[in-house]
Image (cartoon, rainbow, N blue to C red):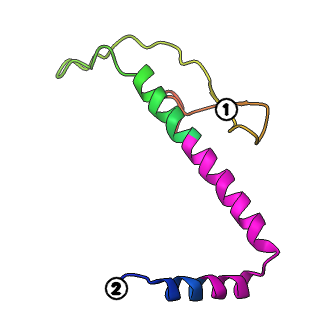
């Protein structure tokens, strides 16, 4: 495939406007931006969560013993700015629950 020139880009935009209509495009762009914001905040939260919960003592090979179990604090998912002003607790499966 070659590169897209200005003529091809204009043609693609005209087809998109004809398919979806001019009234729905701002709503679609708004929801796409909101989704990107949520994805970015979740990726940032996962990255910081991984850094905070790095295992201090890895399991000892062959003995079957692991580091002492500590009760896990419930995780809270924060909403992206402008979405929802509240957070909700999330229950995650632990080693004692059946999967």
Residue wearing tag 1: 78
Q: How many marks?
A: 2
Query: Are discs 2 and 1 less than 8 Å apart at CB?
Result: no
The residue depicted at 44 percent of the width and 84 percent of the height is 5
Compared to residue 30, the image places residue 90 above or below, namely above
Residue pushed farthest left? 62
Compared to residue 72, the image places residue 81 above or below, namely below
Q: From the image, give the main secondary structure of the stretch colored magenta.
A: helix
Q: Does the magenta stretch include residue 3?
A: no
Mark 2: which secondary structure? loop
Distance, label 2 to label 1, CA atoms, is 43 Å
Q: Is residue 20 magenta?
A: yes
Magenta region, residue range: 13-40
Q: Is residue 32 left or right of residue 99?
A: right
Q: Residues within 10 Å of mark 1 (few under 14, many from 20)?
A: some
Residue 51, position in %: x, y?
A: 40, 24
Q: Nearer the viewer, residue 73 or 67?
A: 73
Q: Nearer the viewer, residue 40 or 65?
A: 40
Mark carried by residue 2: 2
Residue 2, position in %: x, y?
A: 34, 85
Name the quadrant containing residue 29. bottom right
First in sequence: mark 2 vs mark 1? 2
The residue depicted at 49 percent of the width and 35 percent of the height is 46
């Amino acid at each position: 495939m070659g590169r897209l020139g200005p003529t091809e880009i204009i043609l693609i935009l005209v087809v998109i406007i004809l398919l979806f209509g001019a009234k729905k495009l701002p709503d679609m762009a708004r929801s796409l931006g909101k989704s990107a914001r949520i994805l970015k905040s979740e990726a940032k939260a996962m990255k910081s969560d991984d850094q905070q919960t790095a295992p201090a003592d890895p399991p000892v090979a062959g003995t079957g013993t692991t580091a002492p179990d500590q009760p896990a604090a419930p995780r809270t998912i924060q909403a992206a700015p402008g979405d929802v002003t509240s957070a909700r607790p999330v229950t995650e499966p632990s080693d004692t629950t059946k999967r």
